[in-house]
Image (cartoon, rainbow, N blue to C red):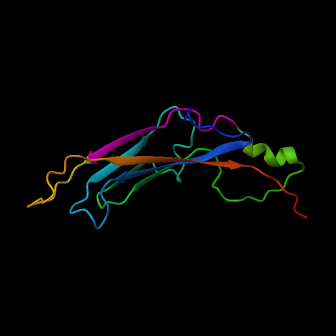
Amino acid sequence: MSDISVPEGYAIDSIDVAITSEEEEGVSVQCDSVAGDLIENDLTAQWTDPASNLSGQDSSCLPVDLHLRVYPNFDGLSTTISAVNKHQALEPWAETGWGVGVLSVDLELDVNTPLGFDPIGQDTDEEITVDVTVVMFKANISLIQ
């Protein structure tokens, strides 16, 4: 995560990881089995949050989607709160240090060779793509009359 630049005033909400096989549903004779795990380490995040999905696998040519909630008690939705002043309203969203560390992903690819006759040749040259999306937010306040 050291390569991620968080703009001033923003915080990391969550990290989404999509693991995709090169094979596409309906095109391939047989899909490979792809699995991935987000490895819990010293990355400051909500590892045990029920919204976090740290493991997944698929053998139907669909992407494996993983999710790690980073910032505590933030669900990505707008929130209305009552506060005496601006400082008190923004205090729950001013914590720093969340999302600091190294994101580790364990990948596993099991190649499923088509049964019987394989007109294309052996299914030996495999590729998977791992897309990491860092979702950020910025707390803003407005007076509600």
Q: Nearer the viewer, residue 42 or 35?
A: 35
Toward the front, the furthest residue is 120
Would you say 134 lies left or right of 56 here? right
Image location (x, y in percent) of residue 8:
73, 39
Residue sitting at 31 percent across and 64 percent down?
25
Residue sitting at 22 percent across and 61 percent down?
30
Q: Which residues are magenta?
A: 96-109
Toward the left, the furthest residue is 116
Would you say 57 lies left or right of 45 here? left
Tell whether position 68 is magenta: no
Q: Nearer the viewer, residue 122 or 38?
A: 122
Query: Which quarter of the figure has residue 91?
Result: top right
Q: Nearer the viewer, residue 121 or 128?
A: 121
Would you say 85 lies left or right of 91 here? right
Image location (x, y in percent) of residue 35:
33, 49
Image location (x, y in percent) of residue 42:
52, 31
Would you say 86 lies left or right of 27 here? right
How many numbered discs? 0
Residue sitting at 54 percent across and 48 percent down?
49
